């Protein structure tokens, strides 16, 4: 089969690789009908995630048709359309029983690698380094899905891929980011980053009852999408306005009730602090650029919540712990427990409350994936979200 394979920093190649096979009787093989390039894939593309190996198949947002199942998979049949959640979860451990699926204790065969960096290991993830399991991803014609009796969600006929594909990751991730804010009607929520996850965080905050949702970015096309399609009531271009001062003006000096960091490790900011963090990154003195996180902490109202759904890989510098502690802030974060949200969000789609396809700006063939990565990372042609068709 053909697959998009990682060969180093900004070096993606479409290659012929062996077809996946059933390795455990809880496995399924899925023929991919749609897959996507995620913002967190760009961290792999830019060489920031360790333990990648040449030839690794990328992609953790995918869906398709079941073509083979192991003997123990009773919930799926050949021909079923399914969306596959990006974390791999066994369904039986303490974490899974608590619906904390991205913390599954049994799905990462390389847990020891993650433990060295993080202290404990999260779940295995499709197409996202050997530290997180070394699983082949879904930017391919076929994929092996472990624990298929737990993860994949069957999709009814008549719903196009584009409406449900993002149940695999970015829609639940954005929704969880908003849910962690404990939104009350009348709340003001600020969202750093108007990429696809930020768009869904904005839309989800509105669904959950926020009165005012403020999108923060620097790209006009993202800010326009936030205002016109996601439901942002206000937007801030951080290259034109000081974010802290503008948020204080918007909220009468109080600050947002909750702040969502949907940016993560590769944040950008104008001014000397950007050069400082890039320099420390180059010397491996820190792994992440936490501009958005710092701003979110400083801007959040006293006693408010900072929700972090942007991906971080390791260590950061100049964390404003004094502000965080003295002002009684709460931080909530985590890789999304996707399994928990898939059915309720599918119901919202079916009811017409949201059509997640609004984030798609480009559709390409799988063979164009390397070009799609370049377009996405460089924001060429107002690129916000790329869907690939194998």
Image (cartoon, rainbow, N blue to C red):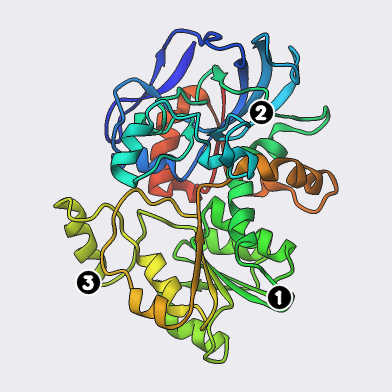
Measure how far apart labels 2 and 3 are at the Cα level.
48 Å
Q: Is residue 240 above or below residue 164?
A: below
Q: Quadrant of the C terminus?
A: top right
Q: Is residue 232 left or right of residue 143?
A: right
Q: Which residue is mark 2?
A: 150
Q: Earlier in the sequence, mark 1 or mark 3?
A: 1
Proximity of marks 2 and 1: CB atoms separated by less than 8 Å: no
Q: Which residue is mark 3?
A: 272
Measure how far apart labels 1 and 3 are at the Cα level.
35 Å
Q: Is residue 388 above or below residue 338?
A: above
Q: Residue at x 83, y 50 (%)?
A: 352
Proximity of marks 2 and 3: CB atoms separated by less than 8 Å: no
Q: Quadrant of residue 179?
A: bottom right
Q: Residues within 10 Å of mark 2 (few under 14, many from 20)?
A: some
Q: Is residue 6 left or right of residue 174?
A: left
Q: Whole-percent x and y of residue 113?
A: 31, 34
- Residue sitting at the far left: 283
Number of marks drawn: 3
Measure how far apart labels 2 and 1 are at the Cα level.
36 Å
Q: Secondary structure at mark 3?
A: helix
Q: Residues within 10 Å of mark 1 (few under 14, many from 20)?
A: some
Do we see residue 133 in this rendering? Answer: yes
Q: Residue at x 23, y 62 (%)?
A: 277
Q: Which-is-in-front pick, marks 1 and 3?
A: 1
Q: Which residue is mark 1?
A: 211
């Amino acid at each position: 089969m053909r697959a998009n394979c990682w060969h180093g920093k900004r070096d993606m190649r479409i290659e012929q690789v062996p077809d996946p096979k059933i390795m455990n009787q809880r496995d399924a093989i899925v023929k991919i009908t749609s897959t996507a390039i995620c913002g967190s894939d760009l961290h792999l593309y830019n060489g920031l995630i360790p333990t990648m190996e040449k030839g690794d198949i990328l992609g953790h947002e995918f869906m398709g048709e079941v073509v083979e199942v192991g003997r123990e998979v009773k919930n799926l049949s050949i021909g079923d359309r399914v969306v596959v959640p990006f974390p791999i979860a066994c369904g039986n451990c303490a974490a899974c029983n608590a619906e904390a699926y991205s913390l599954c204790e049994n799905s990462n065969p390389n847990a020891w690698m993650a433990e060295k960096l993080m202290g404990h290991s999260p779940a295995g993830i499709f197409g996202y380094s050997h530290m997180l399991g070394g699983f082949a991803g879904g930017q391919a014609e076929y994929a092996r899905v472990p624990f298929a009796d737990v993860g994949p969600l069957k999709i009814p006929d008549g719903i196009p891929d584009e409406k449900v594909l993002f149940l695999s990751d970015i829609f639940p991730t954005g929704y969880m980011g908003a849910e962690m804010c404990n939104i009350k009607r009348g709340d003001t929520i600020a969202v750093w980053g108007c990429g696809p996850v930020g768009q869904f965080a904005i839309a989800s905050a509105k669904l959950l009852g926020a009165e005012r949702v403020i999108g923060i970015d620097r790209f006009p096309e993202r800010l326009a999408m936030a205002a016109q399609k996601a439901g942002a009531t206000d937007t801030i271009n951080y290259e034109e306005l000081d974010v802290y001062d503008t948020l204080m003006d918007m909220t009468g000096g109080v600050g947002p009730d909750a702040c969502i960091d949907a940016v993560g490790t590769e944040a950008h900011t104008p001014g000397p602090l950007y050069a400082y963090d890039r320099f420390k990154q180059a010397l491996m003195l820190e792994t992440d650029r936490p501009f958005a996180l710092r701003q979110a902490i400083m801007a959040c109202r006293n006693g408010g919540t900072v929700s972090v759904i942007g991906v971080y890989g390791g260590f950061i510098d100049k964390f404003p712990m004094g502000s965080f502690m003295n002002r009684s802030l709460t931080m909530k974060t985590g890789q999304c427990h996707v399994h928990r949200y898939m059915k309720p969000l599918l119901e919202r789609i079916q009811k017409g409350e949201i059509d997640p396809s609004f984030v798609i700006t480009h559709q390409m063939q799988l063979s164009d994936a390397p070009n799609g990565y370049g377009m996405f990372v460089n924001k060429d042609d107002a690129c916000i979200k790329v869907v690939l068709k194998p």
